Image (tube, helix red, strand yellow):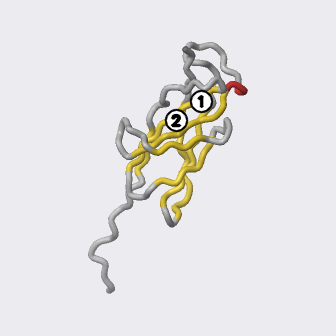
């Protein structure tokens, strides 16, 4: 069975009213897991999964509409988010998870002892 390889990175975007938008991006794999060449046309789409527990489970799953290597996601504020990505081939096979990434979306505490002089 051939598996696809994938790496993933996160880019920051501004804070929105209902959460925090982050754009995730990755490099398209060029080989199957066994090292044989993988043509871009053999990639159907990518699947990004995330949750709030290190190592999973990743209950939130979003698929790209095609084989684009970027996706904007809306995460809940005040959490640490853990993400993985997978490649889905045109043959229906899905890769193993990418390396896990984490991002701290926790809000800082407000200033204390606020006063006028």
Q: Is residue 9 above or below residue 37?
A: below
Residue 1 quadrant? top right
Q: Which mark is residue 88?
A: 1
The residues bearing labels 2 and 1 have C-alpha atoms spaced at a distance of: 10 Å
Residue in the picture at 30% in, 82% down? 115
Quarter occupied by the C terminus: bottom left
Answer left or right for 87 relative to 96: right
* Label 1 CA crowd tier, 10 Å (few <14, some 14–19, many 20+): many
Local secondary structure at mark 1:
strand
Q: Which residue is mark 2?
A: 85
Q: Which mark is residue 15?
A: none
Q: Position of residue 11 (x, y in %)?
A: 55, 47
Answer left or right for 67 relative to 78: right
Point out the residue furthest to the right here: 41
Point out the residue furthest to the bottom here: 117
Q: Position of residue 92 (x, y in %)?
A: 61, 26
Residue 35 quadrant? top right
Q: Is residue 94 above or below residue 107?
A: above
Residue in the picture at 57% in, 16% down? 2
Answer left or right for 9 relative to 41: left
Answer left or right for 53 relative to 69: left
């Amino acid at each position: 069975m051939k598996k696809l390889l994938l790496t993933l990175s996160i880019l920051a975007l501004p804070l929105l009213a209902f959460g925090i938008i982050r754009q995730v991006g990755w490099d398209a794999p060029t080989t199957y897991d066994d090292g044989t060449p993988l043509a871009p046309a053999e990639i159907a789409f990518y699947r990004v999964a995330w949750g709030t527990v290190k190592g999973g489970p990743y209950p939130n799953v979003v698929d790209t509409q095609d084989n684009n290597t970027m996706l904007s996601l809306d995460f809940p504020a005040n959490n640490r988010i853990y993400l993985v990505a997978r490649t889905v081939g045109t043959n229906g096979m899905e890769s193993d998870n990418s390396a896990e990434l984490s991002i701290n979306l926790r809000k800082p505490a407000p200033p204390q002892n606020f006063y006028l002089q």
